[in-house]
Amino acid sequence: MQTVARPEVTHYTYRVTWSAQDNEFVATCAEFPSLSWLASSQIDALRGLEDLLREVIADMEQQGEEAPEPFAERSYSGKFNVRVGESLHRELATHAAEDGLSLNQYVVRKLTAA
């Protein structure tokens, strides 16, 4: 009998929180936003979601689909564009100048302080 390899799911981005509405813990995965798992303990919620992800990924592979790459394994350039309104752009540029910073430095500082 041939053993089927279990898909690797440990590198995905998980969150386990309490759901007052369900009165249980809910596990979610950022790379698979439509999936979740409810359980009475945090550990069981995470384990349940990991098992579900293994099934989903195995099914995707069987159908010739690619599973999303874990965020932790993706490469990022460090650049992204943000469109803001004219007045906010002016306000940010003014604050940056008052602080003696470039607009980029000012926005990075604000984002890291958030």
Image: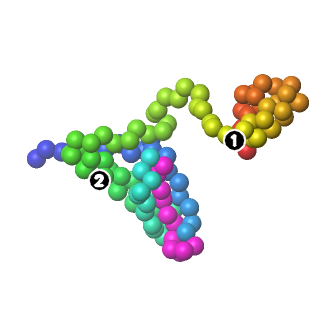
Residue 25 relative to residue 88: left or right: left
Closer to us: 8 or 84:
84
Q: Residues within 10 Å of mark 1 (few under 14, many from 20)?
A: few
Question: Which segment did they paint magenta?
Answer: 20-30
Is residue 27 part of the magenta span, yes or no? yes
Above or below: residue 40 compared with residue 1: below
Closer to us: 99 or 1:
99
Query: Could you say which quadrant of the image residue 2 lies in?
Result: top left
Residue at (27% x, 42% y) in the render: 65
Please name the amino acid that badge 1 sits on.
Gly
Residue at (21% x, 46% y) in the render: 63
Q: Which residue is mark 2?
A: 55
Closer to us: 110 or 36:
110
**Nearer the N terminus, badge 2 or badge 1?**
2
Colour mode of the rendering: rainbow
Residue at (43% x, 60% y) in the render: 36
- Residue 28 x/y as whole percent: 48, 56
Q: Which mark is residue 85?
A: 1
The answer to whether any part of residue 47 appears in the image is: no
- Residue 58 x/y as whole percent: 26, 48
Is residue 44 part of the magenta span, yes or no? no
Q: Say which quadrant the C terminus sits in.
A: top right
